[in-house]
Amino acid sequence: MPRNRQEVPREQRIEALLLVAEEQFLARGFAATSVAEIARAAGIEPGSVYWYFRSKDDAFAAVLNRLLDGETARIGALRGLAATKLFTALDSVEQRRTLHPCVAERAPHSPAVLAYHERLHAWLRDLAADTVVDLVPAYDREMAAEAVVAAIEGALANPVPVRPASALVRYLLSALAGTPVTT
């Protein structure tokens, strides 16, 4: 076992820091989480965080990208209907609902958070595009996929939803298809 952190490979130190930052952001939200609190929970000096991340926004984006990497791999490996993949992705995104308003708030001010948001949006758009292939005519597919993503974005922006994003998307897809959408 290493005697000090310098003997631990940088990638392992970053991974440990990301795990702590994820816990803090999920428990407290972006605004209520400070870099000092992340450092304290990780057992390092507050200034040390900046050796790994230029800012709190960069740490936030790194956490979000790490989560998205895991979900894209997991959902990409699923077999079955495109709708199943889309709704599995929505269930995953819904579990971190509290972070999405923070993403919308920080994206205009942070290139790192904006890049994450664009990446998430593209992934959801691809899943939606795959889902609508069998539901709507070819000439409507692009618009249908964008409508699905807009419904997702709108649902996630609401901090106190009446219904989960998946319920809204299921309704929208069923309306577009003229028949109930099942997974």
Image (spheres, rainbow, N blue to C red):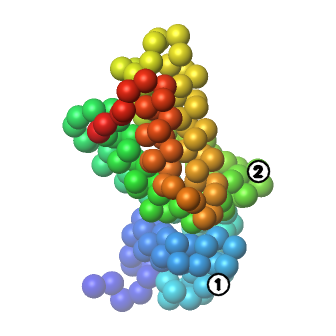
Q: Position of residue 31 (x, y in %)?
A: 69, 73
At a point 64% along the width and 84% down the height, the residue shown is 36
Task: Please state if 96 lies on the left or on the right of 109 as rendered.
Answer: left
Task: In this rendered view, identify the residue nearer to me: 11 or 55.
Answer: 55
The tag earlier along the polypeptide, 2 or 1, is 1
- Under circle 2, the secondary element is loop
Q: Which mark is residue 108?
A: 2
Mark 2: amino acid: Pro
At a point 61% along the width and 85% down the height, the residue shown is 37
At a point 29% along the width and 39% down the height, the residue shown is 183
Instruction: State the quadrant of the N terminus.
Output: bottom left
* Whether residue 117 is visible: no
Q: Residue furthest right?
A: 109
At a point 48% along the width and 29% down the height, the residue shown is 175
**For mark 1, what is the residue?**
36
Q: Position of residue 122 (x, y in %)?
A: 53, 36
Task: In this rendered view, identify the residue nearer to me: 108 or 134.
Answer: 134
Task: Please state if 144 lies on the left or on the right of 55 as rendered.
Answer: left
Label 2 neighbour load within 10 Å: few <14, some 14-19, many 20+: few
